[in-house]
């Protein structure tokens, strides 16, 4: 399958997927919502109008929104500065989150729409029971006819609890609720083959059939003026959504009729098709929600077995253990060149893996004095992230 498709195919795929999309996540970032002065109320009003339009078509809608820190800064009359301490950002978020929701409530009230605030940290999704509780809450809001507005809980988040950016958060939410589509609205019009500011041959890419390393490299051609997530994080988010069987869109959030144009099938922005290899909900959770507690370096034979043949990871294929982890922890596997290959839940502690690595499974009992499994990571708990590394 090629990375790009023809104009005619792109239009067909867009219209097909947009027509079928019944559950949609829309992410809007700081680059769209804010200026140097703070929140742009006109943008928020227009966004409420467009999302209300989607609800009127019978679709379920979630909004993932940035803007709390900018709103807090605006209320205090403080200018934006680089390298602001975390405690100051958290204080600004505490001031601004209520203001942000107030702006949304007023905007949606014009269209007789109710909204609800959902604030999350990464730990809310990394624990399976809490992950399922969040999903149940969102689904209940859908049943009430309410539009959930989700943001990272910047007031309490510390580095280990952060999603890093709302692009990642929007992809995680889309996959959690089995959304058909994730729409990322930003201040760039689309993905380009080169940097359009200094490359006259650069061309827009309207439809991507598969996100490869080439596409990921193209993300470096386009930059955003505001916000924590650049084009690279948006491509990563689209890749996560594709792996779960959803489609994604990245495009200009300040276009006044962007959602109507999208759902009319117009050729605007960049559209990403779903992957043909769909992950289950649990495997997506292992691959994209859990953060690795350690790393295993595999030899070429193990890379082929895991990456291309769908096999479990045996101790004989492990060459190095990095980090310290317990049984059941999330561990990432990589090849000897450092390329990420897979993620999984480990059956042995790091200390025990160091003792049995390079050995046969039949030797585990003698080496450790016990054997919980022949496999270091069983295939049911193992997710291939990059088949290109398994060749």
Image (cartoon, helix red, strand yellow):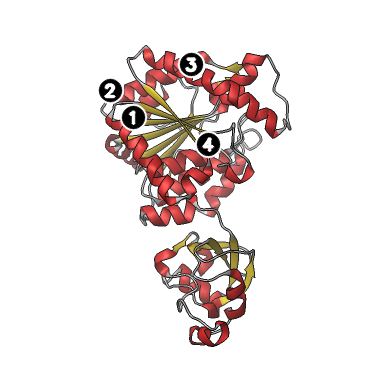
Q: In the structure shown, which secondary structural element does the residue marked by tag 2 occupy?
A: helix
Residues at marks 3 and 4, CA–CA distance in whole angstroms: 19 Å
Q: Are marks 1 and 2 in contact (CB under 8 Å)?
A: no
Residue at image location 29% in from the left, 39% down from the top: 16
Crowd tier of the residue under label 2, counting other residues whose Cα lies within 10 Å: few below 14, some 14–19, many 20 or above = few
Q: Which residue is mark 2?
A: 56
Which marked residue is nearer to the observer: mark 1 or mark 2? 2
Residues at marks 1 and 2, CA–CA distance in whole angstroms: 13 Å
- Residue 209 visible to the viewer: no
Residue with the most extreme front position: 369
Which marked residue is nearer to the observer: mark 1 or mark 3? 3
Q: Which callout, 1 or 3, points at the residue further toward the start of the chain? A: 3
Crowd tier of the residue under label 1, counting other residues whose Cα lies within 10 Å: few below 14, some 14–19, many 20 or above = some
Residue 304 image position (x, y, % from top left):
49, 73
Q: Which callout, 1 or 4, points at the residue further toward the start of the chain? A: 4
Residue at image location 63% in from the left, 64% down from the top: 324
């Amino acid at each position: 399958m090629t990375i790009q498709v023809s104009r005619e195919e792109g239009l067909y795929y867009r219209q097909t997927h947009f027509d079928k999309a019944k559950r949609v996540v829309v992410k809007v970032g700081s680059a769209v919502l804010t200026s140097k002065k703070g929140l742009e109320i006109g943008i928020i009003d227009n966004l409420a109008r467009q999302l209300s339009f989607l609800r009127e078509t019978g679709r379920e809608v979630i909004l993932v929104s940035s803007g709390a820190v900018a709103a807090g800064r605006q209320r205090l009359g403080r200018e934006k500065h680089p390298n602001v301490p975390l405690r100051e950002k958290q204080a600004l978020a505490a001031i601004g989150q209520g203001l942000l929701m107030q702006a949304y409530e007023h905007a949606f009230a014009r269209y007789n729409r109710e909204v609800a605030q959902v604030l999350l940290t990464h730990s809310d999704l990394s624990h399976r029971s809490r992950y399922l509780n969040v999903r149940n809450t969102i689904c209940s809001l859908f049943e009430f006819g309410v539009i959930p507005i989700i943001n990272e809980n910047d007031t309490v988040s510390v580095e280990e609890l952060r999603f890093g950016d709302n692009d990642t958060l929007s992809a995680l939410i889309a996959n959690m609720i089995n959304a058909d589509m994730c729409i990322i609205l930003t201040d760039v019009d689309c993905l380009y083959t080169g940097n359009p500011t200094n490359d006259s041959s650069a061309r827009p890419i309207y439809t991507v059939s598969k996100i490869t390393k080439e596409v990921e490299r193209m993300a470096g051609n386009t930059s955003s003026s505001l916000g924590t997530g650049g084009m690279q994080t948006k491509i990563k988010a689209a890749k996560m959504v594709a792996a779960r069987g959803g489609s994604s869109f990245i495009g200009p959030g300040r276009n006044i009729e962007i959602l109507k144009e999208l759902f009319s099938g117009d050729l605007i922005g960049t559209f990403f098709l779903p992957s043909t290899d769909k992950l289950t909900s649990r495997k997506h959770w292992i691959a994209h929600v859990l953060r690795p507690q350690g790393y295993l370096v595999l030899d070429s034979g193990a890379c082929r077995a895991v990456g291309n043949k769908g096999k479990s990871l045996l101790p004989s294929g492990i060459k190095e253990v990095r980090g310290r982890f317990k049984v059941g922890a999330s561990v990432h596997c990589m090849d000897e060149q450092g390329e990420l290959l897979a993620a999984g839940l480990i059956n042995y502690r790091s200390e025990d893996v160091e003792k049995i690595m390079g050995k046969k499974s039949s030797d585990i009992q003698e080496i450790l004095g016990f054997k919980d499994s022949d496999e270091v990571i069983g295939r049911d708990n193992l997710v291939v992230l990059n088949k290109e590394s398994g060749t």
